[in-house]
Amino acid sequence: MKDKLIIFDTTLRDGEQSPGASMTREEKLRIARQLERMRVDVIEAGFPAASNGDFESVKAVADAVRDSTVCGLARALERDIDRAGEALKGASSSRIHTFIATSPIHMEKKLRMSPDQVLEQAVKAVKWARKWTDNVEFSPEDAGRSDPDFLCRILEAVIDAGASTLNIPDTVGYNLPQQFGHLIATLRERIPNADKAVFSVHCHNDLGLAVANSLSAVLNGARQVECTINGLGERAGNASLEEVVMAVRTRQDVFGCDTQIDTTQIVPASRLVASITGFAVQPNKAIVGANAFAHESGIHQDGVLKHRETYEIMRAEDVGWSANKMVMGKHSGRNAFKTRLAELGIELPSEDALNGAFARFKELADKKHEIFDEDLQALVSDEAAALEQEQFRLVSLKVCSETGETPHAIVVVAVNGAEKQAEADGGGPVDAAFKAIDSIVRSGAELQLYSVNNITSGTDAQGEVTVRLSKGGRIVNGQGSDTDIVIASAKSYLHALNKLHSKLERAHPQV
Ligand code: KIV
Ligand code: ZN
């Protein structure tokens, strides 16, 4: 019997800490449902003390998810822990994850606390968390740069205080695989009560080593990996869930453990997260990149045709790549639409939302004969964006683009319900549309990123546009999709502007 490797997904918490990746409650719920379908063991749904919005999101996930444990992050402070405990009350299985920094640089410069004070606060926090749940995880932040002797001391004390998972974070992505594996082996050997807890790892990707470090830790006895879909996360991101899971699954000859992940749900999860956050997946990304299973060279193609295993170590269908399936068309009814959404795990919050999404579906089906699952995901994202408290809404857009002429856009935007019209010239049709919108909104925001991706193939495919804006230190992403990419662009620009104006304030866990 192999050990079980626990998969702890932190896309909704650390993943959301990527600049611009913030998600609404509904978006988090959609991702959480997909993670549950993928049979993730623990979903870290957020940091409830960060803001009321974070609290509500964690609560919504805890209330909705039944088959995975739902976890909330809390600094080693009673008020943070109480906030997490409150948010998790409705969960069928809950975990509180509390942390405090243990590296000399963090204790001295950030916390201004002595190691003894840190140890005392950690023990107090774990005991406090145990009042809410017997499933408590403790992380010594920046463990990768902490003194192993001090780690042994604090970890032994928090196990005695009631922590059942010890998570060892390489917070700044500084470690090398052999060194990190050795740290895990040392801790397991030297902590006298180590057998009373599961060792977990949480690696950041600053040197591109997050997955390698996590796997090295697993080879040295770690039995939980914290990871994110598409490797999303603070700075260069976290270990990517799909890479960790498929490495362990593919190399069962080496690993003494396996996960319970339904790997066929990996690609749908990757697409969902990319579409919600606007963080597109690079084509050559392992497992979920568009080229991950594409063989270009003649020699490879010939080999694969003769015997698949000559060049393929995994089967594309095992990770959820399937030929685009035409799922619906112009004549599909509301019931079929609702059923397909349910099969995709999409629950719309109300009948009105369902009617809105169905109207969008009919409009799309008029323009595009074949509607794929990816189209349905995109139109639900559009409907969800429209349901948010929108200050700005696109009413109409007309763009003239002609060889030898300057592109010109005329736009009507509803601002808090009152329609305003503006027009502008631009270097191209998108530029003209953005300038016309900006002359109404006057946001003063800086455009950091504009990208267009086709949702499915063919020239009648919907384009999905991501716009990233920054203003006064805040960064937001907006998305929009349409078969007309200029309209998709205008929608995504307004989506980002709405987020920028929502004035959401939240604390950062590491601060
Ligand atoms: O990177 C880190 O140290 C974290 C902790 C909160 C676990 O995200
Ligand atoms: Zn982290």
Image (spheres, grey):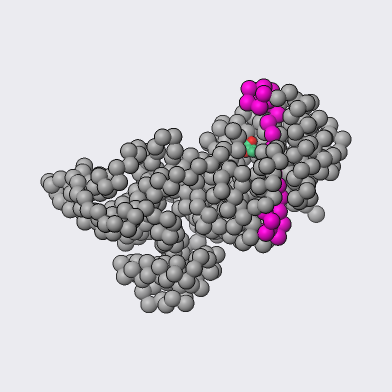
Q: Find residue 210 and report its image quarter.
A: top right
Segment colored magenta: 88-112
Q: Is residue 257 above or below residue 215?
A: below
Q: Is residue 481 above or below residue 98?
A: below
Q: Is residue 28 left or right of residue 422?
A: right
Q: Is residue 422 magenta?
A: no
Identify the residue at image location x=31%, y=70%.
366
Give whichever of 437, 290 is nearer the camera: 437
Q: Find residue 140 and report its image quarter.
A: top right
Residue 99: percent from left, percent from top: 69, 37
Identify the residue at image location x=65%, y=52%.
87
Give whichever of 370, 111 is nearer the camera: 111
Identify the residue at image location x=26%, y=57%.
419
Q: Is residue 477 left or right of residue 436?
A: right
Most extreme residue toward the right is 192
Q: Is residue 97 magenta?
A: yes
Q: Is residue 108 above or below residue 429?
A: above
Residue 449: percent from left, percent from top: 37, 41
Judge whether residue 148 can be spotted in this image.
Answer: no
Residue 492: percent from left, percent from top: 36, 51
